[in-house]
Amino acid sequence: MAENVNNSDSGMDKDTLFMLGGVAFMVFGAGLILSNPIVRRYLGQMGVGSLVQGALPDLDRYIKLRSM
């Protein structure tokens, strides 16, 4: 019985490792995309700051719903 518990813990560790590896690849990919000068110029013209300010009320509402 104890052997089965150890195997499930090992599986959970592997899943966590895969998830963190995926997050690391996404951050690395976003960094590569944002380091491109053409993309930076386009985002500067688009006005990313206004987009973030528009999303903050929705994020605040989501956090309040999660705390209920």
Image (tube, helix red, strand yellow):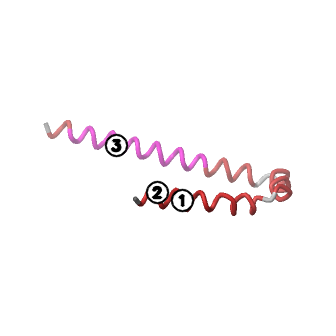
Local crowd size for mark 3, using a 10 Å CA cut-off: few (<14), some (14–19), many (≥20):
few
- Tell which of 36 and 56 is nearer to you: 56
Q: Give residue 67's position: percent from left, percent from top.
A: 42, 60
Q: Which residue is mark 3?
A: 12
**Looking at the image, is mark 3 or mark 1 earlier in the sequence?**
3
What is the secondary structure assignment of the residue under circle 2? helix
In the rendered structure, the answer to whether residue 55 lies left or right of residue 60 reads: right
Seen at 80% across and 59% down, the residue is: 47
Q: Give residue 19's position: percent from left, percent from top.
A: 47, 44
Circle 2: residue type: Leu
Question: In the rendered view of the protein, which quadrant contains the C terminus?
Answer: bottom left
Dividing the picture into quadrants, the one containing residue 49 is bottom right
In this view, 14 is above or below 37 = above
Q: Which residue is mark 1?
A: 61
Seen at 61% across and 51% down, the residue is: 27
Q: Which residues are magenta?
A: 5-26
